[in-house]
Amino acid sequence: MTVTAPTGYAIEEVTLYDAPDDVVRPFVELAWVIEEEAVPEDPRRPFEATASRMRMRTSLGEQRRWAAWTPDRELAGQVVLGRNTQDNLHIRDMWVAVHPGHRQRGLGHALFAKALDAIGEGEGLVVQTWTNGRVPEGERFAESVGVKPGLRMRSSQLDLASIDRKLIVEWSALDSEGYRLEWVDSMETPDRLMPNVITAYHTMNTMPREGLQWEDWKTTPEIVREYERIGRERGQQRLMVLAIEDATGETAGYTEIFYDPRIPSVLHQGGTAVIPAYRGKGIGKWVKARMVERVLREMPKARYVRTENAGSNAAMLAINVGMGFKPAWEEVIWQAPVPDVRRALEASRPVA
């Protein structure tokens, strides 16, 4: 596919790994614009918090990035092409961001086509991208390049200022005899709990995938350590609680949150899961309530907890709704085989 930038723009590949602040700054500023469009109620993420993500190198995946510049070297948009190097090797992630002042000019299509060219013609490759329901342009763009909704997720928010504390006390008292709680209070799992954490993470493979062409994600101690290293370098913190059966030492369930101390008002729910053999015992409610108790006690500046659930995940949605989570917006993961995307892009690409 021949890629032509719209008149007045130049598209070039850039590398931000280890880049100095003056090189990274335009990309951070574009990220601020995109984030404020989708979640205007949030405080702006500090420069270094965003820049560190763009500079990050990891053995778990690879990224390439293309930027669209105006003649005055204003960053009008970018596309990031990513792939995991451990699992789901057929997936190619595509993130396209165009500044609102430069939309409706074919720039998004040109950026998408540039990254698509770099994917090549490998058999069975699948393009994957995301949209936020608060930005309807994203969904229209996704449809125009041939990707299809694979998984619709409800993004929900818990307002800690109005939470039903009586309910949290009630759920916290659901201690099942024969189980204990173990806490991981940092981005470094103790060696003795590593088998339990791996079991917990593997259980996330039981979540509904709906139309996603995903294979099971595999977790090893090395992968956990690398994720933790990435989190520490980004300045991220984690709080995890594991429910463990006393008799066997096996994981029964878990939940975790991630947060950036520089943005203390917003906490992000990581995984929450109950191992299938232990479901129906109230363990999901128990660990979620105990987590909220600690947050209320130890994080006085926290205001919101955010989470995403597959729309078809009735069990977890019921727990979250019962706890007080309210729908905030919808996120969609879109997918399509590379040949389908090429055909759609050729048919829909505007004339430069």
Image (cartoon, rainbow, N blue to C red):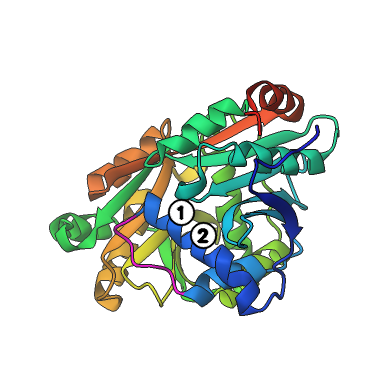
Determine the CA span between mark 1 and mark 2: 6 Å
Q: Residue at coordinates 65% horizontally, 72% vertically from top-left? A: 23
Asked which quadrant contains residue 234, the reply is bottom right
Label 2: few (<14), some (14–19) or many (≥20) C-alpha neighbours in 10 Å: some
The residue that disc 1 covers is 34
Q: Is residue 41 magenta?
A: yes
Q: Nearer the viewer, residue 25 or 105?
A: 105
Asked which quadrant contains residue 179, the reply is bottom left
Q: Nearer the viewer, residue 256 or 250?
A: 256
Res 202 visible: yes
Q: Residue at coordinates 74% horizontally, 64% vertically from top-left? A: 15
The residue that disc 2 covers is 30
Image height check: is 260 above or below 110?
A: below
Image x and y of residue 137, in percent: 45, 36
Image x and y of residue 322, in percent: 24, 44
Q: Is residue 2 left or right of residue 108?
A: right
Under tag 1, what secondary structure?
helix
Image x and y of residue 306, in percent: 36, 54
Q: Main secondary structure of the magenta part?
A: loop
- Residues in magenta? 40-46
Image x and y of residue 105, in percent: 56, 38
Please identify the quadrant where the C terminus is shown: top right
Please identify the quadrant where the N terminus is shown: top right
